[in-house]
Amino acid sequence: MIPLRHAAACIVALAILTPAAAEPVAELVSRLDTARLKGGVPAFAVVLVEQGQPAVVRHAGVADLDDRSPVSERTRFRIGSITKTFTAIAMLLADRTGSLDIEAPLTDATGSGLVPNPWSPQHPVTVARLLEHSAGLQDWVQDEWDLNDPLSLADALGYRPASRTVRWKPGMFDSYSNNGPGVAARILELETGDSYESFVHEHIFGPLGMKSATITPDAATLAALASGYDTDGTSVIPFWHVIFRPSAAISLEPADMAPFVRLFLDRGRIQDHVFLTADEIRRMETPATTLAARNGLTSGYGLGLRSWQHQGHLLFGHGGDADGYLAHFGYSSDSGRGYFVVINVFRHPPLREMRAALDDWVTAPLPEVQIAAGDIDPDAARALTGDYRQVTTRFPGNPPGRRIAVDWVDGALHTRTADAVRELVPVTGRLFRRPWQTRPTAVFADDSDGRLYLIGNFGNFVRQDEMATGQNPEDPALPGS
């Protein structure tokens, strides 16, 4: 085993930028490699995509600490949950051809039995809700995380089926769950008669020219895969088969992510061919199935894409955690820049540092954003105050327990927790943002149940007085599960 400080650094450019663009990229890659070395990362690879420019692929470090083999352009990595973005594209393509309707309620023919739903038929599960994490599902139970068998989707859905019981009213909240894409992909199989793997290879990997991409690993993938390391930076994690491949199973050479990122920058076009329509791209970027979305909040999780703000600018993309690997892709349509980055160790701090550098590069061409605050009537603001309790949790067995107090102090609304007090800046209506943000990230919303909810990128909460007067003791959305 060799210390990382002695690991050979092999930085390779697979394309030549114009002289004007080359220096910023060189500085960026140096910044990324510094983060790699500081964070104890054996290897990283990055793909930089800019409209009107050839993609750049660069990498540094070693693919294996034991034999000191340097990472190369043929080294493959696992991309984890970025697979969910591919799954969402598959559903949109099938929807366009009429193979399925992502907005239609699940029926017996489309696998309604896969997700027992106490709120059906008034509040059905749909493919769109499965993809937006708003179907009311929690995440896998521990046995599903620990399973290391390459199961078919049909068999995977038969393993611990109680994990896929709807826990709160579908169409209410975004709560991240690896169950949703697996169920959606099984519906794709039932409706098209094709396997999920075959559909994605034929309709996505093929048209995009992603020749190295695999969902079920073959011998070539396993031979070329960089070793994935645990949080200690030295313990190898063997290849792990995720129970639902549509959630996190793709492996590839990083260069194959270039046409994928470019697809979003070009608003769905592959050169002169319309692969996805501009409306389909916007639908992926925009949440539509939650209470927050119905009340005007456009930030959050759409169809396989998440949005975030950097230096006041809006970016889209997705992260990916796999055993021994961390990855992320992001882009800005306004700047025409995007990226993919991956490391072969399960350490989040160095990836966060790399992401910050890459987001700086993506937004560098854009002008400074001016932050404007709206006004709120003091009486309207006071009507939103109170004690709020969390109503969703990602993992089974963890009952909602977080509390947030909303206070009106010195002419401003604040959220207060045991750890921090943060201002809520009014934007318009009941939409709010934090002081360092430029777009709304939180909303106060009434539902037909008569309760007042506070929903944002910090979670889903209901005001306590509404719980005291309107709670159904049989409603699993409130006591947890």
Image: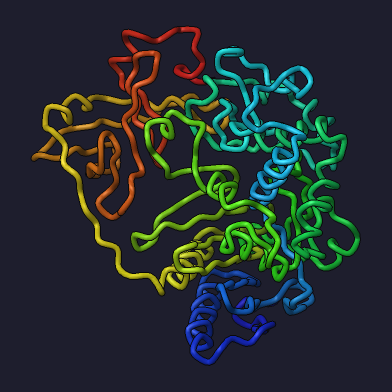
Q: Quadrant of residue 344?
A: bottom right
Q: Is residue 258 above or below residue 102?
A: below
Which residue is at the far bottom?
19
Instruction: Give x and y (percent) for residue 114.
Output: 73, 22
In terms of depth relative to the viewer, which is nearer, 41 or 215? 215
In terms of depth relative to the viewer, which is nearer, 41 or 374? 374
Q: Is residue 142 above or below residue 345?
A: above
Q: Quadrant of the C terminus?
A: top right
Q: Quadrant of residue 415?
A: top left
Q: How is this picture coloured?
A: rainbow
Residue at screen point 58% across, 27% down: 135
Which residue is at the far right?
219
Q: Quadrant of the N terminus?
A: bottom right
Left/right placement of residue 149 relative to residue 22 reads: right
Left/right placement of residue 293 relative to residue 129 reads: left
Left/right placement of residue 202 relative to residue 132 reads: right
Residue at screen point 67% across, 25% down: 163
Instruction: Give x and y (percent) for residue 194.
Output: 87, 39
Residue at screen point 70% across, 61% down: 273
* Res 421 visible: no
Instruction: Give x and y (percent) for residue 178.
Output: 64, 38
* Res 422 visible: yes
In terms of depth relative to the viewer, which is nearer, 89 or 39? 89
Residue at screen point 74% across, 78% down: 72
Which residue is at the far front?
272
How many marks do you count on the picture? Answer: 0
Q: Is residue 158 above or below residue 145?
A: above
Instruction: Give x and y (percent) for residue 200.
Output: 79, 49
Q: Is residue 64 above or below residue 193?
A: below
